Image (tube, helix red, strand yellow):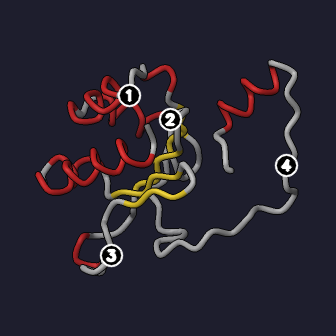
Amino acid sequence: MAITSRQFDQLSEMGISLWQSRTPVSSESTHQDHYLAQTQQSLMKLTKQKIFSDILLSLNLTIGEVKAQNDHLDVGLFNWYFLDEGLEDISKEKPLIQCLENKLVSPNIETIAQSVNLKKQLWHTITNNLL
């Protein structure tokens, strides 16, 4: 079972030791290495998006609990990766929003905000896989 860095820190603080693999476990991903870079500036830009704020609110999270990593956002409950490719490049047979082992992969927030279907798919994925 994969855990986030926040969960690891909390368990470590409680004195619960965890075994960690020295080599990263490779999971099959169709979009590997095609993620948007995440910085503190990109996180601040996201906070201005109403849909992002609404998602955090629905998860009972504050912006202070979200950390920008190199290629993802550590949301505490899960790691959120944004795809760095246009919708036309993504195969129609595969879902645009995927979740595997607390790793949420989706198009960027601007793309999701413009599509009712993507909003529904995101919420469905979060409620069924992450909550």
Q: CA distance from mark 4 to mark 2?
A: 21 Å
In the rendering, which numbered label is found on residue 59? 1
Q: Which residue lies under the disc numbered 2?
A: 75
State if disc 1 and disc 2 touch (CB < 8 Å).
Answer: yes
Which percent across, then down, holds residue 83? 39, 62
| Tag 3 secondary structure | loop
**17 and 30: which one is in front?**
17
Q: Quadrant of the C terminus?
A: top left
What type is the residue that disc 4 sits on? Gln
Label 2: how many residues lie within 10 Å, few (<14), some (14-19) or many (20+)? many
| Tag 2 secondary structure | loop
Which percent across, then down, holds residue 124? 28, 49
Which percent across, then down, holds residue 109? 28, 47
Where is 50 relative to 106, above or below?
above
What type is the residue that disc 2 sits on? Val
| Tag 4 secondary structure | loop
In the rendering, which numbered label is found on residue 20? 4
Q: Residue drawn 42% across and 35% down?
A: 43
Q: Earlier in the sequence, mark 4 or mark 2?
A: 4
The residue mark sitting in front, 2 or 1, is: 1
Q: Earlier in the sequence, mark 3 or mark 4?
A: 4
Q: CA distance from mark 4 to mark 1?
A: 28 Å
What type is the residue that disc 1 sits on? Leu
In the rendering, which numbered label is found on residue 111? none
Question: Furthest-front residue in view?
Answer: 128
Q: Earlier in the sequence, mark 2 or mark 3?
A: 2
Where is 4 relative to 71, above or below?
above
34 left or right, relative to 13: left
